[in-house]
């Protein structure tokens, strides 16, 4: 088939997609599974296209699909049609989230694209290589570790150290001293990755156990 069945019969599928379409139009953002979002976005785009046409036939088609919900149809024809007047297609976007606990279904955000804003020319800056940008990120993270350690010292616990003071102290450090904080940053980052991987493995193990239990009961 040319469309996703979504695990339901045709009538249930059409009703589900109409409901999702109404939710996207009214709230302009919903959270659902990736398969449902990909199928629902087709109908959201079609409704906006009807609204841009603005004729009686298009309004009747929109009403027929949206269960005669005049509030939703009015928003499409009066608001969204004007908002996307200069835009040819691509009225929605999908932002991926994490997997849902239990069945590992990928959750996403289906939302209407924000109204196009006029481009503002950014001030010219010196060309920075990609490697330099990565190094700057590491320095920034190591700098925050340095600030935390300085503030946690016994003599500084009751003091509110300003950011300017901490920046000056950071500049006074030698390259070898800064390298120590960089190593601490990399260790913390590696530990966070390990914790995330352990949580993923635990979820997979729990999912496998639940599946095995279902198979035994069947």
Image (tube, rainbow, N blue to C red):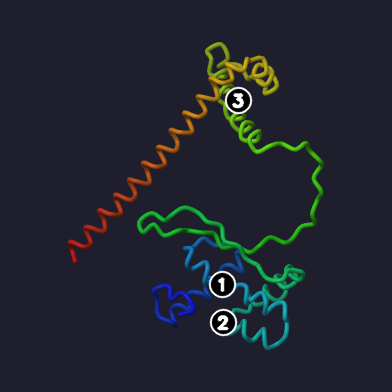
Q: Which residue is mark 2?
A: 65
- Residue 164 as seen in the image, left or right of residue 152: right
Crowd around label 3: few <14 · some 14–19 · many ≥20 (10 Å):
some
**How many tags in the picture?**
3
Q: Are marks 3 and 1 in contact (CB under 8 Å)?
A: no
Farthest-out residue, bottom: 57
Is tag 3's residue or tag 1's residue first in the polypeptide sequence? 1
Q: Position of residue 93 (x, y in %)?
A: 60, 62
Is tag 3's residue or tag 2's residue first in the polypeptide sequence? 2
Q: Position of residue 162 (x, y in %)?
A: 67, 21
- Residue 24 as seen in the image, left or right of residue 50: left
Give the quadrant of residue 73: bottom right
Residue at x 79% of width, y 38% of height: 125
From the image, which quarter does the C terminus lie in?
bottom left
Q: Which residue is mark 1?
A: 21
Give the quadrant of residue 119: bottom right
Q: CA distance from mark 3 to mark 2?
A: 56 Å
Residue at x 63% of width, y 64% of height: 112
Label 1 secondary element:
helix
Q: CA distance from mark 2 to mark 1?
A: 10 Å
Q: Is residue 12 above or below residue 30?
A: below
Residue at x 67% of width, y 80% of height: 50
Q: Are marks 2 and 1 in contact (CB under 8 Å)?
A: yes
- Residue 218 as seen in the image, left or right of residue 163: left
Q: Position of residue 98 (x, y in %)?
A: 47, 52
Query: Depth check: 132 or 40 in front?
Result: 132
Q: Which residue is mark 3?
A: 143
Farthest-out residue, top: 155
Label 2 secondary element:
helix
């Amino acid at each position: 088939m040319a469309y996703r069945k979504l695990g339901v019969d045709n009538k249930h599928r059409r009703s589900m997609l109409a409901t999702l379409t109404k939710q996207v139009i009214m709230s302009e953002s919903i959270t659902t599974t990736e398969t449902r979002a990909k199928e629902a976005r087709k109908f959201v785009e079609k409704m906006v296209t009807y609204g841009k046409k603005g004729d009686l036939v298009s309004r009747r088609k929109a009403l027929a699909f949206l269960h005669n919900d005049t509030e939703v149809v009015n928003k499409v024809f009066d608001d969204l049609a004007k908002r996307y007047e200069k835009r040819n297609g691509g009225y929605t976007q999908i932002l991926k989230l994490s997997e849902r606990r239990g069945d590992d279904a990928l959750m996403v955000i289906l939302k209407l694209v924000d109204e196009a804003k006029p481009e503002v020319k950014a001030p010219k800056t010196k060309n920075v290589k990609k490697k330099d940008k990565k190094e700057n990120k590491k320095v920034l993270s190591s700098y925050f570790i340095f600030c935390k350690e300085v503030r946690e010292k016994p003599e500084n616990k009751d003091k509110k150290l300003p950011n300017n003071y901490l920046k000056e102290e950071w500049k006074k450090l030698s390259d070898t001293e800064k390298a120590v904080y960089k190593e601490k940053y990399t260790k913390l980052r590696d530990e966070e990755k390990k914790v995330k991987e352990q949580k993923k493995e635990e979820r997979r193990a729990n999912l496998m156990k639940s599946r095995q239990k279902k198979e035994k009961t069947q």
